[in-house]
């Protein structure tokens, strides 16, 4: 929803720190958008797309499949699979466990499919507030179980080459699923986790790791708390590790795969992303943390507008 009066002005304290291309984009496309967290809840909010993404790339095939309580879309590369089958990436979109859907980040899914020559399984997990925690986590586990059981026969994938990826709340689910995979019987071997601006600590606030970037654009503390309370209405759940992977025990963390964590310099989630990377490193996991200078939270979804170098 847009108005004729500014709704999301960039705070003066961060204006000169932001990439100039983002500032121009924000003032053209974001400034007049009414933040959904300031309005009564309406599922129609999910139809509003963050502008700035490039069109999805052409891949070999796309097909939707059903899970017990959700669905996913499989994007398969062109050409013949390697011996043993395609590698597979299970991907979770962002949107604060509240917004987004199976179509919202197809640009990333198809880019990953083409760029990594992998089948990308984009999970359309259940969303809050209609389906609060742990619905999305359960759907993530169901997606992994499906890939392990049926991926080879249905998707021609190599189930010894499973990677997990996600953005924002989807990064939260990917990190949690890497931990859940360790607990499965038998454990499922994950080869890589790609966490983009992930939520890792649902106890974070402006009193701690959000303070530095509390005035950064797009993902304000108020909006993040709106997302959190939609998904985690019971505060006693905030510190559970399958809501906040930062609090996972070392015996699980140490068995998770190597990780790449992509963070935006001007994002309230940067601090908790760095902290989770350190937690993984302390557990003996190989981790690479990349911070994109001048970037705010939604930068991954804006590849049609900006090109940033870390």
Image (cartoon, rainbow, N blue to C red):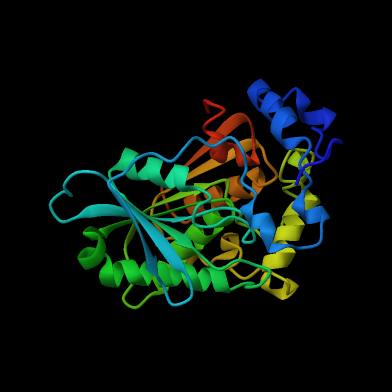
259 in relation to 225, above or below: above
18 in relation to 248, above or below: above
148 in relation to 47, above or below: below
Residue 164: horizontal and vertical position, in percent? 41, 55
The one nearer the camera, 275 or 51, is: 51
The one nearer the camera, 144 or 277, is: 144
Point 25% across, 61% down: residue: 155
Point 46% across, 67% down: residue: 140
Is 65 situated left or right of 308 in this image?
left
Is 269 situated left or right of 210 in this image?
left
Q: Quadrant of residue 71?
A: bottom left
Residue 203 visible here: no
Residue 302: horizontal and vertical position, in percent? 57, 35
Is 141 situated left or right of 272 in this image?
left
In the picture as drawn, the residue positioned furthest to the right comes out as 5
Q: Give the mark count.
A: 0
17 in relation to 65, above or below: above
Point 45% across, 61% down: residue: 123
Residue 174: horizontal and vertical position, in percent? 48, 58
């Amino acid at each position: 929803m847009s108005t004729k009066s500014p709704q999301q002005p960039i705070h003066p304290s961060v204006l000169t720190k932001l990439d100039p291309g983002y500032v121009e984009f924000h003032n053209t496309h974001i400034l007049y958008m009414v933040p959904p967290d300031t309005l009564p809840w309406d599922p129609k909010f999910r139809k509003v797309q963050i502008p700035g993404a490039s069109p999805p790339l052409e891949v070999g095939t796309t097909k939707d499949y059903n899970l017990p309580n959700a669905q996913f879309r499989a994007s398969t590369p062109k050409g013949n699979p390697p011996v043993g089958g395609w590698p597979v990436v299970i991907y979770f979109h962002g949107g604060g466990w509240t917004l987004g859907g199976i179509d919202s980040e197809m640009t990333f899914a198809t880019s990953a499919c083409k760029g990594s020559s992998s089948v990308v399984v984009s999970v359309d997990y259940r969303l809050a507030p209609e389906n609060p925690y742990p619905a999305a986590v359960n759907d993530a586990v169901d997606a992994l179980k499906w890939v392990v059981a049926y991926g080879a026969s249905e998707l021609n994938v190599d189930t010894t080459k499973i990677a997990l990826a996600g953005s924002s709340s989807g990064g939260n689910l990917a990190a949690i699923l890497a931990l859940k995979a360790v607990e499965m019987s038998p454990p499922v071997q994950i080869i890589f986790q790609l966490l983009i601006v992930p939520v890792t600590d649902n106890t974070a606030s402006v009193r701690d790791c959000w303070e530095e970037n509390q005035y950064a654009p797009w993902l304000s503390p108020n909006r993040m708390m709106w997302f959190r309370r939609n998904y985690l209405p019971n505060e006693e759940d905030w510190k559970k590790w399958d809501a906040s992977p930062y609090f996972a025990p070392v015996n699980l963390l140490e068995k998770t795969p190597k990780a790449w964590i992509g963070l935006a310099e001007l994002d309230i989630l940067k601090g908790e992303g760095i902290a989770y990377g350190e937690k993984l490193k302390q557990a003996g996991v190989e981790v690479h943390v990349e911070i994109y200078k001048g970037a705010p939270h939604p930068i991954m979804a804006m590849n049609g507008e900006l090109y940033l170098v870390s």
